[in-house]
Amino acid sequence: MTETRVLARFVAATRYQDLPAQVIRHARQLLLDHFGVALFSSRTPWGRIAVRYAREFSAVGQCTVYGQAWKSSAQHAAFANGLCAHGYELDDSYEGGYCHPGAPTIPAALAAAERDGASGRDLLVAIVMGYEMMGRVSRALGREGKKQHHPTGQVGVFGAAAAAGKVMALEETRLVNALGLAGSMASGNMAFADDPTGTMVKRLYGGWPAQSGVVATWLAREGFTGPDGIVEGRFGFLRSITERFDPSGLTRDLGSDWQILRTVFKPYASCRAFHPLVEAMHDLQRNHGVSAERVTKIEVGTTEGVMQIVY
């Protein structure tokens, strides 16, 4: 049995009552954080464009676009909400690898839940399953050195498909198909890091996988098929990114080590790699009386991965 199928079986079988209280509590907190960040970002220039897109191209109106009185289609609502959630560098962050699970996962789950009339409990268990899937794929991918891809944009399709698929009550085989389709839609590179005038595109990496997850799941429910082993297979996702992936990270301690509990909130609107620097500067100001006027030189240590992105 492929690791992809093991994960699909787990997602399909898990019930709300199987979730520990700590997991449910953290999921609720992440959901509230997600709404706050996305609502704020919906008023930015890129957020307003995404909202207009959802209204312009939606043929049906069943799903909420954050902050709007009208409703859009499931895929367009997921796109706009996911883009806004990733739109101000404040969305939650997975500490087991490189990705931001909430931005693609929650909008996909919510759109599917609204479309199908699912309950609040259905929504919460779907969110947990999305975080579980996305976190485990990210963990298997590892912290590989060559940062040519953007993890949220690429890994996010698996979280979004798992979350939407759970809401839609897909059984194991159809969920495998949904993951296979979603993985075939994975995209997102780091070109924006070299072009300050083009960085608005980064916000797509929350919205595009959310939309892809909804589309892939609907297609799979209708009988459209995708490849088994999409994550770990010979031509699968992990090998398309790096040869140094760890497939054991996909299923290790499945059902006991909940990946959503490895997801944290961002206190600062920046890449989390810069948060230690921000904390250090605050400490120097608060506890050592250092001000900008007194500084002539700063030496900062960081990782090779960060240097590859910045330079």
Image (tube, grey):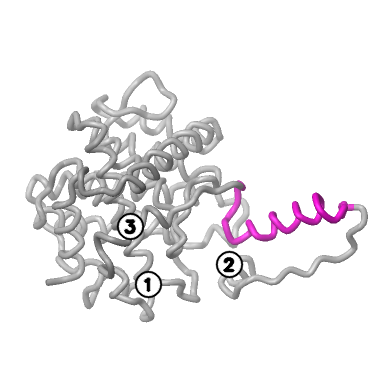
- Earlier in the chain: of badge 1 and badge 2, it is 1
Determine which residue is flagged by label 2.
Answer: 309
Q: Indicate the quadrant where residue 182 lies.
A: bottom left
Residue 158 or 187: which is nearer the viewer? Answer: 158
Q: Is residue 48 visible?
A: no
Please state which of the two labelled residues, at mark 3 or mark 1, is closer to the viewer: 3
Q: Nearer the viewer, residue 195 or 299?
A: 299
Q: Check whether the beta carbons of the residues at disc 3 and disc 2 lie within 8 A of each other.
A: no
Q: Position of residue 137 (x, y in %)?
A: 32, 64
Residue at the location (49% across, 46% down)? 91
Distance of label 3 from label 2 (alpha carbons): 30 Å
Dominant secondary structure of the residues highlighted in magenta in the image? helix
Q: Are marks 3 and 1 in contact (CB under 8 Å)?
A: no
The residue indicated by pointer 3 is 258
Q: Is residue 236 above or below residue 86?
A: below
Q: CA distance from mark 3 to mark 1?
A: 25 Å
Callout 2 secondary element: helix
Q: Residue 189: image x %, image y %?
A: 45, 62
Q: Earlier in the sequence, mark 3 or mark 1?
A: 1
Answer few, some or many: residues within 10 Å of disc 1's Cα (few below 14, many 20 plus, some between 14 and 19): some
Secondary element at image label 1? helix
> Whole-percent x and y of residue 179?
21, 57
Q: Nearer the viewer, mark 3 or mark 2?
A: 3
Residue receiving disc 1: 241
